[in-house]
Amino acid sequence: MSGPQGAGYYGCMDDEDHHHHHMMVHSHRDVAGGTARAVVFGVSDGLVSNVALILGVAAASAEASGVIVAGVAGLMAGAASMAAGEYVSVKAQVELIERELEIERISIAERPKLETQELASIYRKRGVAAEQAHMIATAVMADPEVALEVHAREELGVDPDGAGGDPLAAAAGSFVAFAVGAALPLIPWFVVSGTAGMVASAIVGLVAAALVGVTLAWFTERSWLRTGARQVMLAAGACALTWVIGSLVGSALL
């Protein structure tokens, strides 16, 4: 709404109504957290790596038992590796943030004037007048906990209340996501084998890759056709490469 009518409309709104109106017309999803990213990445990685492994092994020796053993081994090894990597990554990030917050906490307690000047400088760089920037910084520094939170957000770009995430939850999520993706192309081999098994695994893998792409497109609000096609091409490329290598190895050994 624009013009005098719009100005009158907003002028009649109190702060709570104005906040509610803003949330209705301009809301955001939580994009800072890594949960959605970790799940999509885990499923995609498990799917692509295991369908490629399965087709590579099947190309060398199409016996169902050997393919199933390789597929289960790939699932467990990959899921464990993903979980360990995610745990170490998140844990290191949490420890780094905690260390930086402790340094900031000590600096606020021992050098409050310097920290006030630093905060005022940040506000000035954002266009706030020098006198007003100093007043805001002084008001913030009056409460050490508020000061720490503001400095953490302004200087470090982190939320001190949720610094880095939960390493165990991240590891568990990655393990489950990878296992789900890796299990999909393995399922047909409990029913069929040989060429039929390879075709079924390839179809399941490509369809699942397309669904991962569509899901990713929904999160990012991008073209579902382009994103889905990209995922399918990546999966198809990995499958083709390992199938060729498996066929060559199988021919050399047999």
Image (cartoon, rainbow, N blue to C red):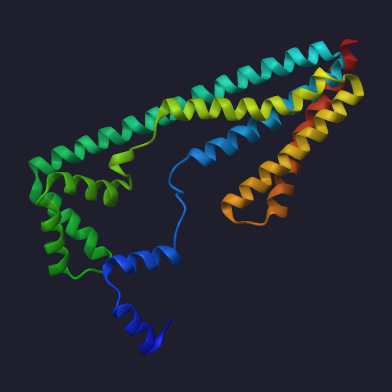
Q: Residue visible at 52% across and 24% down?
A: 83
Q: Is residue 101 left or right of residue 53?
A: left
Q: Residue visible at 80% across and 12% down?
A: 66
Q: Residue visible at 40% across and 62% down?
A: 23
Q: Is residue 197 left or right of residue 133?
A: right
Q: Quick one: quadrant of the N terminus? A: bottom left
Q: Residue visible at 45% across and 25% down?
A: 87
Question: Is residue 240 visible in this depiction of the protein?
Answer: no
In depth, the one of 79 and 10 nearer the eye is: 10
Using the image, determine if residue 131 lies above or below residue 80. Answer: below
- Where is residue 96? Give x, y as percent: 32, 33
- Where is residue 251? Give x, y as percent: 90, 16
- Quarter of the image for residue 124 reads bottom left
- Quarter of the image for residue 211 reads top right
Using the image, determine if residue 103 lies above or below residue 126. Answer: above
- Where is residue 222? Give x, y as percent: 62, 56
Q: How many marks?
A: 0
Q: Is residue 14 left or right of residue 83?
A: left
Using the image, determine if residue 222 lies above or below residue 175. Answer: below
- Quarter of the image for residue 204 reads top right
In depth, the one of 166 and 247 nearer the eye is: 166
Q: Is residue 68 left or right of residue 10?
A: right
